Each structure stands twice: as structure tokens, then as C-alpha cells.
Amino acid sequence: MAFAGCECDGSTDDEDGPSAAGGAGGAGGSSGNGFPTGAGGAGGGTTTGSGGGACGSNLTGTLRDFSASHPDFEDFLGVDPGIVLPDLGADQKPVYAGQDGNPTTTGQANFDQWFRDVEGINASVLYTLALTPGPGGVFTFDDSDFFPLDDQLLGNEGNEHNFHFTYELHTTFLYSGGETFSFTGDDDLFTFINGRLAIDLGGVHGAMSASIDLDARAAELGLVAGEIYSLDFFFAERHTTESNFRVDTTLVFIDCGVPPE
């Protein structure tokens, strides 16, 4: 896949992307593709790294800002796995599994707005995660004060931070064998590999962690060494008063992230 505006060689696009702030520790910088990057928060947000595949460590996705009055935001608490079906939809979106057993959601119509642009419901901006290289070939983005939309789009609504948003990212990686992908954060996180649900941290909760050992789950996820596969990542921050976001991975990404249509 190619990413519009990303030459994937470290060069800078002539057209600047929209401005998005990083964590509370500082404003977002610019990645090599012209879109805003994550910045340092209280937990030590990262700066641009190098390596990790054709696009280095920069992956661009879409932030969507919501009002606290949205029926699925702010009113619920609790761990809630099973919100989405095990297979990614044909449109590369999570498929709502139904109301039964999912107490932190209010139905398909409202859930389907989380990762789609809906006029009058949300507002969106591109945002680049800049992962930092570390020992053992691990790339990390870590921000325990992850509020990239403070004072932007729909605003903070009288709060210290903009607490109500989602983040959607689509990319591909080369599976060589031995790779891992880990996430720690709150609230919801759905990660699909090769179109199959690999991490389900659904619900409105404190920071939770999950890891994928790709070799251990290769048969389940349909992975064969030497082939290229998709990684589709869906995150939601739905409640005050915290927002944690950490990714650690040894995956070698092939593209810069493909913003959804």
C-alpha cells in the first residue's frame, strides 16, 4: 500500500497537514510526511525514531473527536470484552457484536460512529505516532498523559483535557518470525492482524495491557513467514480522568499508515 503524501524515505511533503497537539508535556512536532507527530506527555512521550521498515517508525492514522454527550461516552465504567466480532469488516472497520453482554455501549448505530466521520457527531484530524527505537529491535510510543486533541476540534468542553476521542490506524508489516506487539492503555483497544481480532481490551477502564506473540498465534491468525499482513488498530478514550497509551513492537512496517476513506 502507498500512503498519499508519504514518500516513505524521510523526505518532507510540500503540503503541511493539520495541526494536532501531542501529550500534555508539549506540542506535537512534524513527522517526515508533513503530519503532526506525538509529543512528550507526563509518561515520557516519544520523539521521531528511525528504522522499523520503509516508513521508519512513523505511522499515521485518524483521530476523531466526540462530545461527552455522545451516548457511548462518559456514562459507563467497566471492562467489556466482546464489543466487536472476531473478524474485521469488509470496509476495514470493527463489526459491532450486539448489545447483549456489552454494557458500555448503546447499540450498533452509535458504535458505528466511533471510527467513521459523521457530520454533526465528530470531527477528525490525521495524527502520526512516532515510535522510538530501543534495545532488542523494540519500537515504543509511550504517553501516560495522552491527550492529542486538547483545545482542538470540539474542544475540552470545560475539562482540563479533551477526554473523548478515538484513534484509527491501518498499516501492513512483513512477518519474518519472532515478532511481538504489545499495548497498554485505556479505554477500548481492538487490534486486528490479518483481519482477525488479536487484542480485545474493550470497555471503559484503567490502563490494561495485552501482548501478541505472533509465532505463538501464527496458525490462529493465518500467518506464514515471509508474507506481508495487515495490522488494523482501533482505540477509544471515552471517560475522564486518565488517558494512557503505550505501544511496544518489533514489527517491521511496510507502509506509513493508510488513513481510512
Image (tube, grey):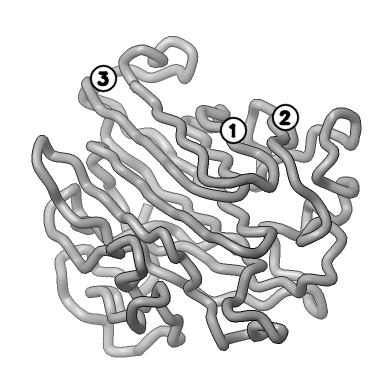
Residue under pointer 1 = 200
User: Residue at (35%, 80%) from the top-left corner?
Assistant: 28
Is residue 131 left or right of 72 when viewed as pictured? left
First in sequence: mark 1 vs mark 2: 2
Residue under pointer 2 = 82
Determine which quarter of the picture holds residue 96.
top right
Mark 3 secondary-structure assignment: loop
Give percent across and percent down for residue 169: 48, 54
Contact check, label 1 and label 2, Cβ < 8 Å: yes
Give percent across and percent down for residue 43: 33, 61
Contact check, label 3 and label 1, Cβ < 8 Å: no
User: Residue at (54%, 56%) from the top-left corner?
Assistant: 168
Rendered view: 9 above or below 24:
above
Q: CA distance from mark 3 to mark 2?
A: 29 Å
First in sequence: mark 3 vs mark 1: 1
User: Residue at (56%, 52%) from the top-left corner?
Assistant: 235
Residue under pointer 3 = 225
Determine which quarter of the picture holds residue 210.
top left
Give percent across and percent down for residue 225: 26, 19
